[in-house]
Image (cartoon, rainbow, N blue to C red):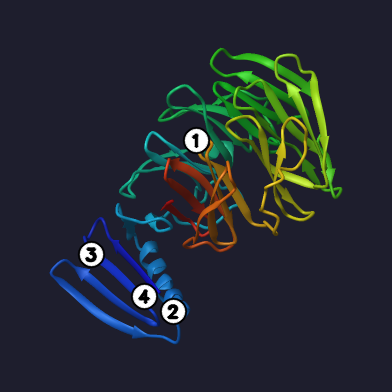
Amino acid sequence: MLRQRKLHDPISARTWESICDGSQVRVRSGRPGNQKCDIKHLESYEDARKWAEKQEWTRLKKGFVLVNAQAQSGEPSLLCYLGRAYTGAMTIIGTGGLIHCNQYVEGGKGDELIFIDANARICARHDLSNMGLVWEVQTTSRHGEEVLRMDAGIFTWTIGNSTLTLISERTDRVPGFVSVAGNLAAWHARGFLEVRDVASDQTLLRQPLTASLDGGHTPQMVGALSPDGRRLAVCSVPGEIQYLDVFSGKVLARHQGDFEMITKMHWTADGRWIIALENYGRWRLMCFDAASGEPRPDWMLQEDMSRSDFAISSDGSQLAVTHRGHMAIYDLSTMERRCHFRLDHVVRSACVAWTASDVVSIRTDYGCVGTYMV
């Protein structure tokens, strides 16, 4: 087996390259024209890979980055170190050709938002720590506008602006979810389910809904707007998803299943399926027919999916799933697995987003951002 990685320091122009060929690692490092070569022999390819990865991580922490425009499927095209490990809140999206993620502010009370370009340069930082942690970021149809789920509530934010606009009631507990479709944003905070048109500032739906306590201790509340914004799927009780008409508030259907707590839920782009991640129970990634509530018959992801995340590509054709330090890409129409590869610098978990039609990006609990070709 062969594994080749080349990192560079943008400031000093030094490079560090490792080539794992079987149980042997060849390392070339230094400044251009003055490089040193070393060879290290280990017991197996796996030992060689682990040694090279540890050395790579040391360089990343010193400011080296990986940028590889020729990366093949399953290979990283970008790796960079943000610093500071997992805080409990991780989010990542792609916007305007940039990777956009959160990072805890050292010595502060919350997060900043970081923008990273294709050359692994941090081109902007925005300190939002006065409002706590950033749990989720979603984009609206309006250029540069985002909706943020934070400790203090649901906010809209225009990229580059120094201020946030609170659109929910101010909260003392993290809102249960936020979901955006076009200019509509849905959330649950302070015991109310709400849907608002953030462009016109018009409230379309507001009604009380109580989150049940799964296991007597953890609030169950997650929701997702359909792609056309007309329906809102909500799970407030383990084992049940209800579907509401956004404009009338009427409950269109209630579907029961053999699942426990759901922590994340999304519609497919055609509005046919609901994909949901279950915690506790059997820790599954599930897929339901939005019309009947029946499980998708060709769904193959039945194994333990603890410490997982998923994302649907913008055109709705592909599903990316992270699971225990690995990534799998599926064709959503056939559920055929297109590729499977190992992720870099993950301790337990990573959040994932599609940042281009053939690129997925992750933000890991080890403080690393990576993009991978699919």
- Contact between marks 3 and 2 (CB within 8 A): the answer is no
Q: Earlier in the sequence, mark 4 or mark 2?
A: 4
Return the x and y of residue 128 as percentages of the image width and height: 51, 37
Q: Earlier in the sequence, mark 4 or mark 1?
A: 4
Residue under pointer 3 = 14
Q: Is residue 197 above or below residue 51?
A: above
Number of numbered discs? 4
Asked if residue 146 lies left or right of residue 29, the reply is: right
What whole-number distance in Å separates the C-alpha atoms at marks 4 and 1?
A: 35 Å
For the residue marked with disc 2, what is the amino acid? Answer: Tyr
Residue under pointer 2 = 45
For the residue marked with disc 3, what is the amino acid? Answer: Arg
Element marked by disc 3: loop
- Contact between marks 1 and 2 (CB within 8 A): the answer is no
Residue under pointer 4 = 20
Q: Residue at x 70, y 23 (%)?
A: 194
Residue under pointer 1 = 314
Q: Earlier in the sequence, mark 3 or mark 2?
A: 3
